[in-house]
Image: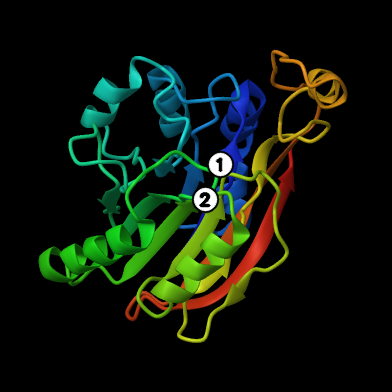
């Protein structure tokens, strides 16, 4: 199976580029599934129900999220109705939505997608390492046939991301980092067959600071005073990773950084 996983979609420019180019990208890459982190897809910070619907209707197969997922008031109720949007599984019990979803698409083997949030420089949440262990044990018991297992680790610290990769090596197909919006050059297979990449990068405006307009961010750096950030304009690049995974064993055969410069 070939899977394309897009890094954080940023604002309307990112959503528009996805909608406009997704069919051509699927044809060009031969991807069986295309997934994306969408927690910044509405206004550059957070995800609204309408933004999520727009991306799913455009053809994305599943959306993951992160620490900004609760910004819009309509999200908790929407998340309880839409299984193709997952939130970090290590939020406390009782949080709306689910942190794992088994995606079943006709003609393809099932794929479990787990979403986790880091704890370094992030909101206080449960331990992502132990929550991952619990979710995998649940899968082993309830859906042992689901061999392809992907983890979106939405985290700040590179050491924490690398640590989870090694912790899950051989037990999942891939551990893919999101959140920092800068695509890293370390896509590789770990020793026991798990694909790993510290950060998939950003799907948003290129001439920006992490997708946001440069000028107010520079003013904040130079003056240390509050500024209102806005999503940048201009050309957009979609960034992520392409994975080839063995359907039977769930082991990754390859992983490569991927980028598409949109019109």
Q: Is residue 53 above or below residue 95?
A: above
- The outermost residue toward the bottom is 191
Give coordinates of residue 234: x percent, y percent.
81, 25
- Residue drawn where x is 49% and y is 25% of the image: 46
Compared across the picture, whether 19 is left or right of 246 comes to right
Q: Nearer the viewer, residue 67 or 12?
A: 67
- The outermost residue toward the right is 222
Give coordinates of residue 248: x percent, y percent.
32, 79
Quadrant location of residue 9?
A: top right
Give coordinates of residue 240: x percent, y percent.
62, 52
Q: Nearer the viewer, residue 31 or 219?
A: 219
Which residue was labeled with disc 1?
23
Mark 1 neighbour class, 10 Å CA radius: few under 14, some 14 to 19, many 20 or more: few
Q: Is residue 95 above or below residue 257?
A: above
- Residue drawn where x is 58% and y is 49% of the image: 156
Mark 2 neighbour class, 10 Å CA radius: few under 14, some 14 to 19, many 20 or more: few
Q: Nearer the viewer, residue 34 or 175?
A: 175
Q: Which mark is residue 7?
A: none
- Residue drawn where x is 63% and y is 37% of the image: 21
Compared across the picture, whether 161 is left or right of 132 comes to right
Compared across the picture, whether 123 is left or right of 105 comes to right
- Mark 1 against mark 2, which lies toward the viewer? 2
The quadrant of the rendering that contains the C terminus is top right
Which residue was labeled with disc 2?
120
């Amino acid at each position: 199976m070939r899977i394309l996983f897009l890094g954080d979609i940023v604002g309307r420019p990112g959503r528009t580029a996805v909608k406009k180019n997704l069919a051509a990208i699927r044809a060009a890459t031969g991807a069986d599934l295309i997934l994306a982190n969408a927690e910044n897809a509405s206004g550059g910070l957070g995800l609204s129900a309408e933004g999520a619907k727009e991306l799913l209707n455009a053809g994305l197969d599943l959306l993951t999220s992160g620490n900004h997922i609760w910004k819009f008031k309509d999200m908790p109720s929407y998340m309880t109705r839409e299984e193709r949007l997952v939130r970090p599984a290590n939020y406390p019990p009782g949080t709306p939505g689910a942190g794992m979803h088994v995606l079943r698409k006709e003609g393809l083997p099932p794929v479990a997608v787990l979403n986790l949030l880091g704890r370094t420089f992030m909101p206080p949440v449960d331990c992502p390492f132990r929550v991952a262990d619990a979710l995998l044990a649940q899968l082993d018991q309830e859906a042992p046939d689901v061999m392809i297992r992907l983890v979106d680790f939405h985290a700040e610290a590179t050491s924490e991301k690398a640590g989870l990769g090694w912790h899950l090596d051989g037990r999942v197909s891939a551990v893919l980092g999101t959140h920092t919006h800068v695509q890293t050059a370390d896509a590789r297979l770990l020793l026991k067959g798990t694909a790993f990449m510290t950060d998939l990068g950003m799907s948003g405006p290129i001439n920006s600071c992490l997708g946001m307009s440069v000028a107010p961010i520079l003013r904040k750096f130079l003056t240390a005073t509050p500024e209102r950030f806005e999503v940048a304009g201009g050309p957009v690049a979609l960034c992520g990773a392409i994975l080839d995974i063995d359907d039977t064993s769930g082991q990754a055969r390859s992983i490569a950084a991927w980028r598409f410069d949109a019109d």
